Image: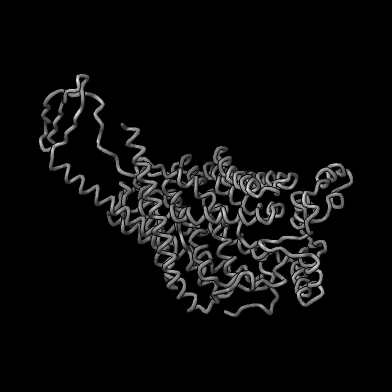
Amino acid sequence: MKMEQKQDNTSLMLLSATGLALLTILTVWKSKQCKYRLLNETGGAMFYGMLMGLTVKLLSFYRGQHEDNMDAVCICRGLNSTLHVLTVNFTSPSPRHVGKVRQGCPPLSTPLMDTFDPEVLFNLFLPPIIFHGAYTLNQNRLIKNLGSVLTFAFLGTLISCFTIGSCMYGFTRLMVLSGRAADGDFLLTDCLLFGAIVSATDPVAVLGLLSELHMDLDLHSLLFGESVLNDAVAIVLTHAITTYSQTGEGHTFDPPAFLLSVGYFLAVFAGSLLLGFLFTIMTALLTKFTRLHENPLLETSVFFLLSWSCFLTAKASGLSGIVAVLFCGLSQARYTIHNLSSEGRTRTKQLFEVFNFLGEIFIFSFMGYALLTFPCHVFRALFITGALLSIFISRACNIYPLSFLLNLGRTTKIPRSFQHFMMFAGFRGAVAFSLAMRDTSTEARRTILTTTLLLVGFTTWVLGTVADPMLQHLHIRVGVDADGDETPEDLSFEAATGRPDTTPGLWHRLDYKILTPLLTHCGPPLSDTLPRCCGLFARLLSSRRVQEDEEQVCEVGDSTFDLEKTEERSGSPGGDSGSAHQEDLLEGDLGLGTDPPALTREP
């Protein structure tokens, strides 16, 4: 009986989730048909999740009221098929027992979500969401702005974390002075943990906004690149602070515990990064030296399963699955995609796009549902107010000083209008919620979960709604065609000229001379780039060319460029732009921004 009831609850839960997804999709589709930009998938999904939570809450309340006013009757059957009745009067302090009682009487039915484990939802949909964000990043734009993106993602997230933690610690002291909290309810580590949880922007919400508005490509690369990478920093930073709080006293600074947490941060981050790249090497070599491209279905299946296995392996090894799958997606888009057939590339991109779309709907629907049905919410007005203020303060302390420092070395400056919108577009979402819900054992942690859900709702609905008017107010161009707006200088030097890259840098030499010819069919032969002592190794890895009969092409990002056409382009003004781009790199711009000065936008 219990098993059948659990199966019925599971089926009802899945049916409700499917209905919410369909309702969200149809609503968003209708809003786009009417050219109503104020509603996106994440906001609609969270709204319908709240409606479902409100419905369940009202039904539970009505059911509880109904049961309080009547006796609960359990009917059991004995071995002789005669009925035995147990009557319990809930209004009396001492229940009266009538008849005989048989053990194993089924309890009252549990709520709908009692049979659902949220970890299943996050393990199922969060890895494809993060992978899709990394896999669809414009590699050329990312490399051009790599220095700026890494600065905002790593240093900016650290600044945001400690700024939010400091502000919230001040607000908790104010709560103690005003008598709204006891001394010791909120430790400094709790405030820093909250800062780490909400310091990272959400790539799902950011991607939804960017895809809908088609804003400036440089602003797109800065915002989306930061949101994808800072999730990894926030996750590892959360684990490091948790490690510190478990080993330290929490009230005072403990140097050994701090050093241990820093070492844990570096070890987990480096290990997860290497694991993600290891799975890329496995996938690239498998697709390069086999004929999987002859069957796009098998090719897509192998690519998908190996990419997902990266997340599961990292989790099983005690590393960060999100960090591993993030760097796996970045490196798969850099190398493995060259070994896939054209149909395989299309299928893999569409498969992860579908998982990303459904994942954001289900996760945001669950967040809306949990906002109204979580039984242990702790609403503290002063804490919530401080959190709303601190996310804007931390974002300002992050964007404006770092933009000033980056502009000192950038050829193309980050305009003031871009900085204002980047400060404003601090959306929070799935990653923050998944980190907050992992520990609700104390009142402080339950307060963090409640406040995180409210911040997600505020940034999704309020900031997402006014994003389009703010873009118009700041005179930032929208409706940009990513493909039509590509310029010759957006191509890498090797693709644009067909000549080797002579940029003086370890990474450029390693990428062009070793990794690209090792993992793909592009680049110079390994026999020309490796030392003579590695000749056998070079011939072994370069001997089999699966696609010898195909036209030689060099693929960069999502585009495919014929070398003959690019050679003709190298003699045109586009080639001059490529040469100018190369000169900028030789001057040591290091990815801080390499557009020609003529393209600099005025604030």
Residue at 34% x, 41% y is: 9
Q: Position of residue 542 (x, y in %)?
A: 82, 47
Q: Position of residue 333 (x, y in %)?
A: 66, 55
Figure quadrant of the C terminus: bottom right
Q: Is residue 116 visible?
A: yes
Residue at 48% x, 61% y is: 205
Q: Is residue 389 visible?
A: no
Query: Which of the pair 178/29 is nearer the observer?
Result: 29
Judge from the rendering whether residue 220 lies leftward or rightward of residue 550; answer left or right.
left
Residue at 60% x, 72% y is: 481
Query: Which of the pair 245/347 is nearer the observer?
Result: 347
Q: Position of residue 176 (x, y in %)?
A: 31, 53
Quadrant of the rendered image containing residue 282: top right
Judge from the rendering whether residue 401 lies leftward or rightward of residue 40; answer left or right.
right
The answer to whether 232 is drawn above or below residue 223 in the figure is above
Judge from the rendering whether residue 493 lies leftward or rightward of residue 376; answer left or right.
right
Q: Position of residue 8 (x, y in %)?
A: 34, 40
The answer to whether 52 is drawn above or below residue 571 in the figure is above
Q: What colouring does the structure picture have?
A: one colour
The answer to whether 437 is drawn above or below residue 571 in the figure is above
Quadrant of the rendered image containing residue 507: bottom right
